[in-house]
Structures are given as C-alpha cells and as structure tokens.
Amino acid sequence: MGVNSAVKNQHPNNQVFDVSINIPPQGGSKCFDDDGRLKRTGTVWTASSHIITAVIGSGVLSLAWATAQLGWIAGPAVMLLFALVTYYTSTLLAACYRSGDGKRNYTYMDAVSANLGGFKVKLCGLVQYVNLFGVAIGYTIASSISMMAISRSNCFHKNGEKSPCHFNSTPYMIAFGIIEIIFSQIPDFDQLWWLSIVAAVMSFTYSTIGLGLGIARVAETGNFMGSLTGISIGTVTSTQKLWRSFQALGDIAFAYSYSLILIEIQDTIRSPPSESKTMKKASLVSIAVTTLFYMLCGCMGYAAFGDMAPGNLLTGFGFYNPYWMVDIANAAIVIHLIGAYQVYCQPLFAFVEKAANKKFPNSQFITRDIEIPTLGLRTYKLNLFRLVWRTVFVITTTVISMLLPFFNDIVGLLGALGFWPLTVYFPVEMYIKQKQIPKWSTKWVCLQILSMACLIITIAAAAGSVAGVVLDLKSYKPFN
C-alpha cells in the first residue's frame, strides 16, 4: 500500500515544486520516477530498437570486405568473438546504471564518475565524445556513398555499363547535413523512439537485400569464392595483407560498437523490473539478431566476390543489376543513417547543453525556450542555443566528411579507438570497483586478461586503419 504525501521534486531546470502524490512501496509516483523526473516508458523492445539502430549501421556494409581479409576461418570466428565480448561487457556496464546507494547515472560519464572518479572521468569523456563526433563523420560519408550509388546505378541502367557515370560526393553530403540539422532539433532521446524504429526497419531492409543479392550472385556463378586464409599474397603484398587484416578487426569492432550510448539508452527504460535486467535482455536480443545478420551478410558477400569483395557491399559493380533493388537498399541505408546519426549524437548534444546551462544559468540565449504552436501536436519548444550549437556541429562534421571521404579506413579507425576503452576497459573497471572484486582473485585476473587482449586488438586495428588513411591521402584530391 502506498501513502499520500507531499514531496518536493527537483525539476531538471533546478526549480523546486511541491506535488501531492501517492507513493508506491518502491518510491516515486504514477507520474514521476524516484529521481523526480517524468516516468520513463522504455521497454525491452524500445531499447532493442535503439541498439539495433545504432549497431546495424554502415558497419554491416564493410563486413564482406573484412571477411575477405581474414578468410573463412578467422572472419566468422572474429565476428562471433566480438559479439560475445560486446554482450558480456554490456551486461557489466548495465549493472553500473545505478550506484551502490541506488542513485541513477544518466550518462556513461556519470557512471564512470560515480564508480571510478578522478582523471578517468575526463579520459572517458574525451574518448566517448571524440568517438561520437567521429561516428557522425562516418555516417555522413556512408550516406553520401549510398546516394551516389543510387545515381550511378540509374546512370548505368540508362547509358550502359561502359558509361563513366562519375559523381561528386559533396552535394550528397550537403543534402544529408541539411536533413540532420532539421532532425537535430529533436530535444532528447525519449522523443527519438519513432525515428529509431523506422531506422531499425530500414537496417533490416538493406541487410536483407544485400544478403539476397549475395545469394543470387553465388547461385548465378555456381560456386563459393574465397579461401580459408583470406585475400591471397599476389593480389596484395604481404605488408598490405597484414595492414588490411588489422584494419578488418577495426571494421568488425565498429560494427558492434554501441557501449558508448548504452547508459543513455538504459536511462529511457521504465522500472520495475530493474533497468539492468531489462537492458541485459535488450542487449541479448539485439546482439543475437545483429550477429546473425552480420554472419550472413559478411559471409555471403565474401562468397559472392571473394578477394574482390568491395569495401561497401552494396556499391560493388556486380550489384547494379537488378538496379531497382539496389536503389531500394541504398535508400534504406540513407534513411537508417539519418536516424542512427541522431541516436549517436544525442549524448554529445546533451553533454554540451548541460554544461552550458551549468556555466551560464542566467543566460536567456542558453536557457530560454520559445514556445511555437504546431498543428494538432503539442507545442514545440525552440531553444536558440540548441538551434545554433547543433547546427554548427552538423556543419562541422559535414565539412570534415568532404575532406576525408574514406569509408573503410574511417570505419576501422573509429572502431579501433572506441572498442577497448568504452566497450571493455571502463565497464570492466567499474564492475570490479562496484562489486569489490579482490585484486588477484580468479575473476579479477580473468577480467584483466580480457581487457589486455582487447587492448592489443585495438592497437593493431588502429595501426592498420591509420596505414590505410595515409595510403589514401597520397592519391586523394579534396572535394573531387
């Protein structure tokens, strides 16, 4: 039984107000959670859709290429290994949403601050937000590639396969940037659920089409291409083989990276049951589904193209017929990336806006919301600081994308930079601290071995991706 009581709730804008509420045994009320914020409504399925939106992104398109570098044995094995590591560490991270005293941690940085503190908080923030910034660049590049692929396939269909059909990626990046400026004005994660569901559906659409085209090509040629050890020496030099293998690790790591926004997603989940329990289920569902798709797309793409597997599965020359199906797949990629861009950038947007509010609490430009009536919908609150800052952010990522449009290398580098610190190191260290696992105990040693092994993989992947970027820069001319 609950009791009727007057409770002072702390509003996010630091206004204190009294409300009479019926307090259930767990604390909180029918309208507010135990921290005074509006009741969270997220479920296993909304959390799964957020994760799938973030995970099955442009990363899936590079998996055929990654499998080609590693071969039939190492390729699927590495994908499965990354899936297991990501799931395990995500369960450790989910347990850190609440501190020992039950206090919620709203962001990844809040969790690190509550459990580790000190310099590690600043390090975590730097790595997380640089990675989010990089993901925005990677998604802008990927979307422009897909938009160009639509134009090229239509050009080939109209003028014949021998036509040059060259296009400049710059106009497509600008178009994507304009769309993101508009969607970036959605205030926060809770209001993104519909965009995440649309994006998740789109991700399944293009992944399924890519898989279907791979199967069709294998059926057409009548044989599975590829080898047990990957791309052969001769097609590439032994040095290139090594760097490409390392880069492939980064591509696969990028395809599984969502830990950097896991806490933010978890903060949308209702309770009971506990948020960590729901998040573990959502992680299991999401990683099982994405791993199945990754295995199928990566392996069938490799089987279809062998050593010549393209860096972006749907832009391989052999996939321009049937051209209309490829157009649908690439359009689905663009729609998905519009949503994924927002899911990834919301934590960064929120961090800057929260810091600005704290630094300048009396600034009308930063704190004032202008109410704009909308037809048949609730009043939209326009914040001028949000409008300016998010617009500048999108423009910056778009310009950098124009300067460095190297899809595979950027994907590999982002995967390498974010995988060990955000997916492995911080979750492991926070879990050890929270559960007070004794130093040099069996569990402590096993967790440290896992962390060190992933660090070595991260260093190798980063080295391979940097080598790829350096090689690309030698022959690249900006804006061409």
Image (tube, rainbow, N blue to C red):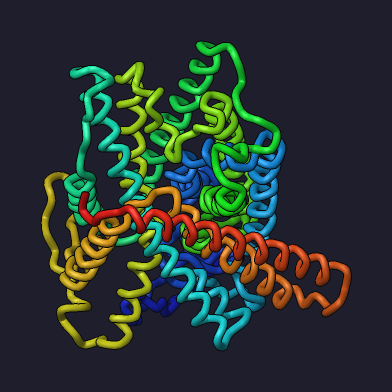
Say whether residue 267 is visible: no
| Residue 444 relative to residue 99: left or right | right
What's the residue at 22%, 78% (across, down)?
Answer: 367
Q: Residue 339: percent from the left, percent from the top?
A: 34, 47
Q: Position of residue 150 (x, y in %)?
A: 26, 30
Q: Is residue 308 above or below residue 116?
A: above
Q: In this image, 127 relative to 138: left or right?
A: right
Give coordinates of residue 270: x percent, y percent: 51, 56
Q: Position of residue 272 (x, y in %)?
A: 59, 56
Quarter where residue 172 is shown:
top left
Q: Can I make out residue 65 in this image?
A: yes
**Total numbered badges shown on the rendered structure:** 0
Is 137 or 348 nearer to us in this picture? 137
**Which of the pair 390/246 is nearer the observer?**
246
Viewed as shown, does residue 374 lie left or right of 471? Answer: left
Query: Considering the image in quadrants, where does the N terminus appear?
Result: bottom right
Classify 56 as above or below 433: above
User: Measuring 36% from the left and 78% from the top, which residue is drawn there?
Assistant: 18
Residue at the image position 57 percent from the left and 54 percent from the top: 243
Quarter of the image for residue 478 reads: bottom left
Residue at 41% x, 71% y is: 20
